[in-house]
């Protein structure tokens, strides 16, 4: 099975900071990777798919990059409304649509 | 607007059964892949099961294979999850999620609000 490892598990940053979250696959998954945002008490929301394609309506301060085994979600300028837990998900093939463990982002 | 409304959650004893439903609207349900994703209290997301749009192929996580059955009724725009032999570690909020396309191995662009399943004696 392909394992998805996110890092860090949590981070605290100031408003306006550039924030980077990493997701690593144990085997190459091409660009079959998505990122989701889950705000406290809310439903997950799709941010990015195909590693770098921004979902419609998502602010441009969010971006994704990577291919193969190493992927990155970047928030170029952290805003208070970005407080959330972020999950990566591989979808190269069913039934293995596993999520990473999540990264909790807080404001310092 | 796309809407997904789950129902059927509740308290069930270990070894018991429960059937979840997800009523969908606002898109062509019959041609879309659909999935169930769960989240245990204070934990991360876990994909549970998916069913494709066109051919109805089904897929399961190892943790539920043989105990859960996913199905769909395209005439009612409704997705189901039959859960048998429930265990304590099945306790979670269960989300219905719409796949971006007809297949299951794609991201989820809409999620329901979730229904809580609690397995406890």
Image (tube, coloured by chain):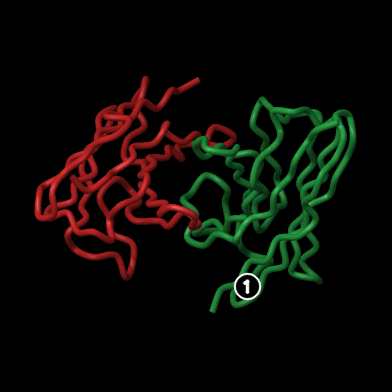
Q: Position of residue A102 (x, y in %)?
A: 39, 36
Labels in figure, total: 1
Q: Quadrant of residue A30?
A: top left
* A33 w.r.t. B14: above or below: below
Q: Position of residue A51 (x, y in %)?
A: 29, 45
In-front residue for pair B49/B57: B49
Q: Is residue A5 left or right of residue B3?
A: left
Residue in the picture at 70% in, 45% down: B57
Label 1 sits on residue: B28
Residue in the picture at 32% in, 53% down: A48
Q: Is residue A27 left or right of residue B33?
A: left
Name the secondary structure under disc 1: loop
Q: Is residue A20 left or right of residue B101?
A: left
Q: Is residue B112 left or right of residue B79?
A: left
Quadrant of the drawing holding the C terminus of chain A: top left
Q: Position of residue B55 (x, y in %)?
A: 70, 53
In the orientation shown, which residue stands out farthest toward the front?
A: A108
- The chain identifier of the residue carrying mark 1 reads B
Pointer 1 local density, CA inside 10 Å: few below 14, some 14–19, many at least 20: few
Identify the hue of chain B. green
Q: Position of residue B51 (x, y in %)?
A: 67, 49
User: Which chain: red?
Assistant: A
In-front residue for pair B15/B73: B15
Residue in the picture at 52% in, 62% down: B110
* A29 w.r.t. B39: above or below: above
Q: Quadrant of residue A19?
A: top left
* B74 w.r.t. B107: above or below: below
Residue in the picture at 74% in, 58% down: B79
């Amino acid at each position: 099975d392909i394992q998805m490892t996110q890092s860090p598990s949590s981070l605290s940053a100031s408003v306006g900071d550039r924030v980077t979250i990493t997701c690593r696959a144990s085997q190459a998954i091409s660009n079959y990777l998505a990122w989701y945002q889950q705000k406290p008490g809310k439903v997950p929301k799709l941010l990015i798919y195909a590693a770098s394609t921004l979902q419609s309506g998502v602010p441009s301060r969010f971006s994704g990059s990577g291919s193969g085994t190493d992927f990155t979600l970047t928030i170029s300028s952290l805003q208070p409304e970005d407080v959330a837990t972020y999950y990566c998900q591989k979808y190269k093939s069913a039934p293995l649509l596993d999520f990473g463990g999540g990264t909790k982002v807080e404001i310092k | 607007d796309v809407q997904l409304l789950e129902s059927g959650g509740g308290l069930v004893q270990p070894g018991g059964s429960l059937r979840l439903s997800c009523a969908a609207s606002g898109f062509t349900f019959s041609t879309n892949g659909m999935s169930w994703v769960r989240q245990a209290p204070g934990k991360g997301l876990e994909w549970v099961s998916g069913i494709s749009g066109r051919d109805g192929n089904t897929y399961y996580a190892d943790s539920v294979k043989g105990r859960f059955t996913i199905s769909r009724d395209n005439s009612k725009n409704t997705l189901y999850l039959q859960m048998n032999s429930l265990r304590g570690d099945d306790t979670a909020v269960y989300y219905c999620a719409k796949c971006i396309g007809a297949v299951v191995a794609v991201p989820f662009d809409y999620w329901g609000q979730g229904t809580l399943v609690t397995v406890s004696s």
